[in-house]
Amino acid sequence: MRAAGVRAEGPGPDNKNKILVLMVVSMVLSYLPWYNFSAVLTYIAEEFNLSGSDTGTILAVFQVGQAVLMAGGKK
């Protein structure tokens, strides 16, 4: 016996497309800092007079932080 107003099927095609679009947009937005940080690191180094070693350390810490956050979401 089915309750009134309850669908027995899964999400319809329209909902699947919305979910797909939202997932793609969220992935693009989450990867933007990853790719842009390497590009702007040169300008940051010039602005703050950082050495190559300093910029390498900053980039490594940024990438480790990204990896930890990505791995932390999986259980």
Image: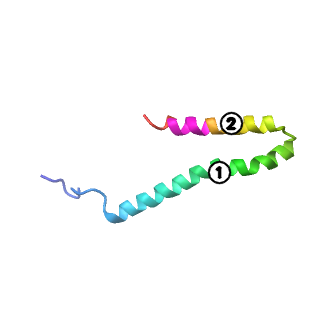
Q: What number is the disc on residue 35?
A: 1
Rendered residue at 62%/35% (across/down): 64
Residue at position x 76%, y 46% in the image: 41
Please tell me in which quadrant of the rendered image residue 50 appears: top right
Q: Which residues are magenta?
A: 65-71
Name the residue type under label 2: Ala
Provide residue 22's location: percent of width, then percent of height. 47, 57
Q: Residues within 10 Å of mark 2 (few under 14, many from 20)?
A: few
In primary-sequence order, the first of circles 1 and 2 is 1
User: Is 1 on the left or on the right of 23, as rendered?
Assistant: left
Q: Which one is nearer the viewer's eye here, 61 or 4? A: 61
Task: Name the spot of residue 25 as percent of width and height, x first.
Answer: 52, 57
- Mark 2, residue position: 60
Label 2: state its secondary structure: helix
Q: Answer left or right for 39 relative to 22.
A: right
The kind of residue tagged 1 is: Tyr
22 relative position to 63: left or right:
left
Q: Residues within 10 Å of mark 1 (few under 14, many from 20)?
A: few
Depicted 35 relative to depicted 64: above or below = below
Furthest toward the left, the residue is 1
Name the outermost residue toward the bottom. 14
In what element is the residue under mark 1? helix
In the image, what residue occupies the spot 46% across and 61% down? Answer: 21
Marks 1/2: CA distance?
13 Å
Which residue is more in the foreground, 13 or 31?
A: 31
Quadrant hosting residue 17:
bottom left
Q: Work out which residue is located at the far right of the displayed protein and give it.
A: 49
* Residue for point 85% across, 42% down: 48
Question: In terms of depth relative to the viewer, which is nearer, 44 or 4?
Answer: 44
Is residue 8 shown left or right of residue 31?
left
